[in-house]
Amino acid sequence: MHSLAEENYLKTLFSLSNDKAEVNVNDLSKRLGIKMPTVTSMMKKLATKKLVHYESYKPLRLTEKGKKEAALIIRKHRLTEMYLVEKMGFGWEQVHEIAEQIEHIQSSEFFAKMDELLGYPKLDPHGSPIPDKNGKMVWSAYSKLSECKKGDTVKITAVINTSEEFLKFLNSREIHIGLKLKIKSIEPFDNSMVVTYDKRNAETLSQIVCERLLVEK
């Protein structure tokens, strides 16, 4: 059993290591908003538990045990988000903070029942994969909307940024997972896109928005 703080460190390390296999202490410190000496102290503690490979002045790496532990925390978080949306009627922009609290419950039976009631979902409300009970996670090779071309018709499969502000913006434009878009034009100056969907008039999406939407053709 790990403390709440330890679980948060593991989850953050896992997230950062998706971009690169090794993570430096400074990046971890910035992401968590915690001072470097405190982060270093925790890394030494996690290293003694064989969850992290730690050496002074070298990048951090999760051990296989650490990866599995982190993935199981993420599993609890994403299952909770899905339950809140599917069974309790919360909006996808409302669930992150609640799931942050519930993910630290230690009962595996609690989350197994949640998984069963949901019908064993593979994805959370934001399109992110839910690790299985063994910590295995299947990633799909989606493209960013910003990488698509004029004339393409695509389906939104996931969002990269799940901040409340961004999700509220998508809500205001009636943009959601599963929505099909047709790219009518791309502005050369700023790479903004004009798209149509659901019989709406043309909608302009900024490059920032297009970078945060994952799609499949």
Image: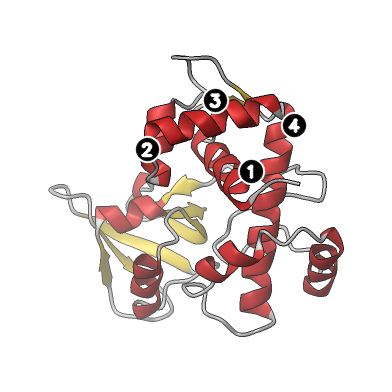
Residue shown at 63% from the left, 62% from the top: 124
Residue under label 2, please give it. 35
**Nearer-N-terminus badge (1/2):** 2
Marking on residue 65:
4
- In the visual, does 207 lie left or right of 161? left
Residue under label 1, please give it. 139
Asked if the residues shown at circle 4 and circle 2 are in contact, with their CB atoms under 8 angstroms apart, the answer is no
Q: What residue type is labelled 2?
A: Lys
Q: What residue type is labelled 4?
A: Lys
Instruction: Specify the farthest residue to the left.
Output: 189
Quadrant in the picture for residue 44? top right
**Nearer-N-terminus badge (2/3):** 3
Q: Label 1 vs label 2: CA separation?
A: 32 Å
Mark 4 packing: few (<14 Cα in 10 Å), some, or many (20+)? some
Q: Nearer the viewer, residue 148 or 137?
A: 137
Residue shown at 37% from the left, 74% from the top: 168
- In the visual, does 36 lie left or right of 82? left
Q: What residue type is labelled 1?
A: Trp
Query: In the image, residue 100 lies at what x, y percent?
Result: 57, 62
Q: Label 4 vs label 1: CA separation?
A: 20 Å
Tag in front: 4 or 1:
4
Residue shown at 48% from the left, 71% from the top: 176
Q: Nearer the viewer, residue 28 or 90?
A: 28
Residue under label 3, please give it. 21
Badge 3 marks a residue whose secondary structure is loop
Q: Which of 60 and 85 is in front in this view?
A: 60
Tag in front: 1 or 2:
2
Q: Nearer the viewer, residue 132 or 48?
A: 48
Mark 1 packing: few (<14 Cα in 10 Å), some, or many (20+)? few
Query: In the image, residue 173 lies at what x, y percent?
Result: 35, 76
